[in-house]
Amino acid sequence: ITLSTKIAIMTVRVFEFGDGKLNPLGGPTRKAIHSQLEEWRAIDSITSVVLVGKGRQFSAGADMTEFGKPNSNVIGMVELTQYVESYPKPIVAAIDGVALGGGLELALSCHYRVADPKTAKFALPEVKVGVIPGAGGTQRLPRVIGIERAITMILNGVQITGATALDWKLVDGLKHPKQSLVECATSWASWSELMPLSRISDVSLDIQQVEDLCNKVEKTLPAPEFGGFGAHAALKAIRASPNFSKGMETESSMFVHTLGHPQGKALRHAFFAVRTAQKVGKPIQNKKHSLLTNHSSSTVGVVGAGLMGSGIAMVLLQAGFIVQLVDIDAKALQKGVTFLKGTVTSYVRRGKWSRLKAESIIQSLKPTTKLVDLKDCVLVVEAVLENLSIKRKIFETLNEITPPDAFLLSNTSSLSIDVIASALSHKRRPLCAGWHFFSPAHKMKLVEIVVGKDSSGEVISILQNLTKQIGKIGVVVGNCNGFVGNRMFANYTGEACFLLAEGVGSVQMVDRALSKAHGMALGPFEVGDLAGNEIGYYIRKEKGL
């Protein structure tokens, strides 16, 4: 799609690329960009170009499904960025939404960059999926924002906003509220025709500064064999950046090296597995359900103010809900409230939240010792200890006091959702499902959405969308002992305990072996310390073990 704007005798052409969704830079898209630029190159009346992603995103980057596949005859990402940078006419990248990975590398190869201040987000997250930026990201980014900031963005996959990008000089301008992004980019394109072409690869870097910073950062990285292979490869490419051509060769070599490494393959397997797991279920019918569209005026309830209940309440408060936190034990309730207020205070102290936001969240917390106060809730999640009898009594009460269309969910980690749901009337059972957060709930990303035999498909779909909205990864699982996470974890921790019982090693040795040598975030006993060992105790007690 092309648009033309004439300024005197100069013509700016606008090219929209991609699929209109995330605009990944797969072979067909790269070919389309190259072909269009090649055509316009030969037309003298076209004096500058604007590149903009179709729809509401610039580009989420390379198409990872192409990784490891034989090269086709289509122009590659490195060749495309080199072609764009060496283009004899000014090219302006108009960035709306995300410019990630290869998308940011394409933008960096353009002569100028403008962005939407409200939606634009920039990152080079390749290390998180086991590779490194492979189309000049490790070479061009340090030349634009400085070596220290570039190292942070590349090694940590840090994402920055349009305002920060302007402050760091990653973009040259932000669109005005009264103009469209394309209008802003077109103005920049017309102005750029009056100036010499600006190519990032021509910018010089201080060799000693690069070397000193790389040496300093290298000492902080995990060893290559302990999960740091990608970060070390990226740092090696950055270290070579003072010489652009040599740096590009090093980057290309390191990209290929990481592409075939077991760590990279494992990280990409996990990346695709997470996304596949979230796609299970039926398409949602009611996208305007109040749980999805009206958080600030929707009241939800959490039953149980212990470690799990308080953590879930924190998640829902952060999402903007009014939260009724119920615990019939006044001391337990007060302990939960103290935890929540302490967490909010710590967020303010660390600069994560403003004082105004913290006060708003505390005002949205409604602690109570009475279940009847849940009478107006659109969703209630039960998070008491793993005792089937207690849970069933709570659901019997919820059946009577909550609105007839309220979602009634259990955070059980091991008990049957069907048995819990049987405490409800037949009409209410379709609204019952498992919503199993992992402890500590306000920190852990994974949530199991447990489907009971009577659970409505629409309820599950709404829960999937809601779980995503509150910043978690929702995975739909079947109803069985331990579901998926704890069914795996039981054998894992069981074997760890056998190692202790058999005198093979200490708690510290087991944790160290699994976290350092085998890449787990925490050892099994460290997990117990963080999540709380009482959860496992109550599960075993309920089973008579």
Image (spheres, rainbow, N blue to C red):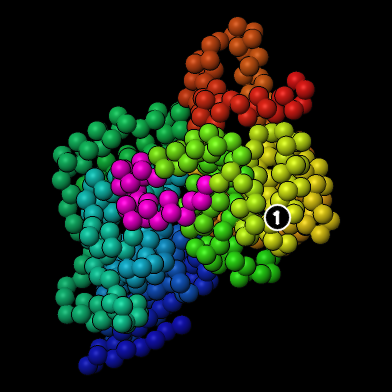
- The residue lying at 18 percent from left, 57 percent from top is 203
Q: Is residue 103 above or below residue 527?
A: below
In the image as oriented, which residue stretches furthest toward the top?
503
- The residue lying at 17 percent from left, 41 percent from top is 209
- The residue lying at 64 percent from left, 8 percent from top is 502
In the foreground, 310 or 88: 310
Say which quadrant the C terminus sits in. top right
Q: Is residue 12 above or below residue 63?
A: below
* Most frequent secondary structure within the magenta stretch: helix
Is residue 100 visible from the viewing direction of this image? Answer: yes
**Which quarter of the picture shows residue 184?**
bottom left
**Does the magenta portion include 101?**
no
Q: Is residue 424 above or below residue 87?
A: above
Which stretch did the figure color magenta?
343-367
Q: Please give the count of numbered marks on the rendered protein.
A: 1
Left or right: residue 257 compared with residue 163 = right
**Does the magenta portion include 345?**
yes
Q: Residues within 10 Å of mark 1 (few under 14, many from 20)?
A: some
Left or right: residue 356 compared with residue 324 = left
- The residue lying at 29 percent from left, 87 percent from top is 11
Looking at the rendered structure, the kind of residue marked 1 is Ile
**Which quarter of the picture shows residue 213?**
top left
Q: Position of residue 477 (x, y in %)?
A: 71, 46
Q: Position of residue 119 (x, y in %)?
A: 39, 67
